[in-house]
Image (cartoon, helix red, strand yellow):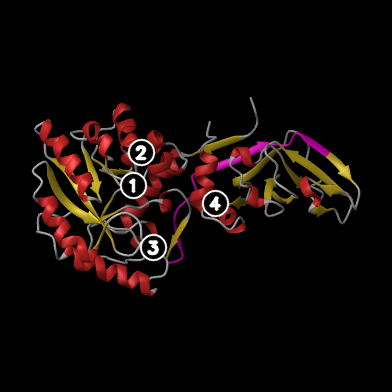
Amino acid sequence: MYPTEVIVDYDILRENFKALQALKPHCHLVPVVKSDAYGHGLVQSSRAFLAGGAERLAVFRVEEGLALRQEGIDCPIWVLLGALPYEAAQAVGRGFTLAVFDIEQAKALSEAAERRGLVQDVHVAVDTGMGRLGFLVDDLQEALAQIFALKGLRVCGIFSHIAKANDVMHPVTRRQVDGFRRALKMLPSVCVENHSCASDAWLGDLIPELHYARPGICLYQEYQVDGRIVTHDAMTLKTRLVSLKTMPAGATVSYNCIRTLTRESRVAVAPLGYEDGFLRSMTDKGAALVHGRRAPILGTICMSMTMLDVTDIPEAAIGDEAVFMGCQGDEQITIAELAERANTTPHEFLCAMGKHRA
């Protein structure tokens, strides 16, 4: 078996959900499992969250919701993109709550529901400042009037998304919060499934009066609340060393000769690279764990190989495990560390690596 593996611990995902829900029991958490559950596996992750007590799930596309239905997952599912017009017929009557962000989209969905004698639940998307999908707050009153008039739809609530949730005092964040609260006043009291908070916004109590939230990345990686770790990384990326040799000072390593050895060095080759989702932006940065110690990455990340400096790990040998993300001994390389070094988000790294999950 090829030695490079991406492993997900679904027990950790289950416990992550339980730990987050326990922080604020009054708020219904709806785990976001879009994009193959951030690379962790759509179906397996969904089952883990449901086992942890989740009552609903959130996906992005109708296709993802249908995939869950095909696997026997019958809980309510929020579809955050809603149904595009050509998907309306297959989306209605499946236990989905579909986003609506455009009047023509809403009309197509209503017509599809009416043809089947159904009333389809929807959430109306509101653009409070993200600049993506949704009706602008100033246009919402008129849009709601048109949507409420469609006989095939039942509006269950509205939703939005915060552009800079990790900065609660940022002027855009404050405008978004104020705008969403203004939008809430336009709704009748029966519309109770209102949500705007994803991970950072929810953990930061940005709109604490909401009874629904959509945790995403905080379910999959380590997060701290008041200095206490409440969730943990669930994904591990590891391989085994396939080559080991001593190279002289002055030798260069990997493409473009960006790393020149300053001392005689033992250089190991790990059969792992950007084809495995280990981003090329990790070139000459960070380390892998070998025998519980950090072996620095040398030079450019290749498509299928990465070179490591194991000079200070004399017991390193061909066949030894090299952990590029995860724990080994008392050491850990977290997804947050990798993302910081690569100048990206944990989301990108996890989605890239998750495509190669066993």
Look at the image and give the residue range highlighted in magenta.
226-244
**Mark-to-mark CA distance, 4 and 3:** 22 Å
| Secondary element at image label 2 | helix
Dot 1: few (<14), some (14–19), or many (≥20) neighbours within 10 Å? Answer: many
When the figure is inspected, residue 196 is found, relative to residue 107, above or below; the finding is below
Q: Which mark is residue 46?
A: 2
For the point 60% across and 51% down, the residue is: 332
Question: Camera-side residue: 56 or 223?
Answer: 56
- Residue 49 in view (yes/no): yes
Dot 3: few (<14), some (14–19), or many (≥20) neighbours within 10 Å? Answer: some
Query: How far across and how far down the image is residue 243, in percent?
Result: 79, 35
For the point 31% across and 72% down, the residue is: 175
| Residue type marked 1 | Pro
Pointer 4 or 2: first along the chain: 2
Q: Which mark is residue 317?
A: none
Pointer 4 or 3: first along the chain: 3
- Residue 235 in view (yes/no): no
| Secondary element at image label 3 | loop
Dot 4: few (<14), some (14–19), or many (≥20) neighbours within 10 Å? Answer: many
Q: Which mark is residue 335?
A: 4
